[in-house]
Image (cartoon, helix red, strand yellow):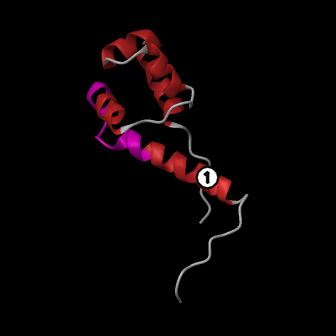
Amino acid sequence: MNMHNPAPPGELLAGWLEDLDMSVTAFAAHLGISRVMLSRILNGHAAVTADMDLRLSEALGTTPGYWLKLQAQRDLWAAGERAKERPPVARIGA
């Protein structure tokens, strides 16, 4: 199964903030998190958690699970890329 390189959730979230003309500091305060935590997500240094997904869903009107699905797609793609560097795991049974 070939997957394309999905955008990190933080990259999409950065576009939302730009469209809303909202600063990282203001949005972090609105979410009730630190600016550092939001910045880590925006820059791809931290993953979206279930708690963060719910906060983003409430703030932006997205469906609960939307941001987690984006994160899972990104994580699966990255794992697939790393898997290319190791021997394949043999299937058990026939």
Mark 1 — residue?
4
Asked if 88 appears above or below 30 in the picture, the reply is below
Residue 17 falls inside the magenta stretch: no
x, y percent for residue 35: 45, 14
Asked if 9 appears above or below 60 in the picture, the reply is below
Mostly what secondary structure, the magenta segment? helix
Which residue occupies 41% across, 47% down?
69
Q: Taking 69 as reference, is 58 left or right?
A: left
* Any part of residue 21 in sight: no
Q: Quadrant of residue 32?
A: top left
Q: Taking 22 as reference, is 6 left or right?
A: right
Which residue occupies 54% across, 81% down?
92
As helix, strand or loop, the secondary structure at mark 1 comes to loop
Q: Which residues are magenta?
A: 57-69
Closest to the observer, 51 or 61: 51
**Crowdedness near tag 1: few (<14), some (14–19) or many (≥20) residues, C-alpha within 10 Å:** few
Q: Taking 61 as reference, is 5 left or right?
A: right
x, y percent for residue 17: 45, 20
Q: How many marks?
A: 1
Which residue occupies 52% across, 86% down?
93
Residue 62 falls inside the magenta stretch: yes
Q: Quadrant of the N terminus?
A: bottom right
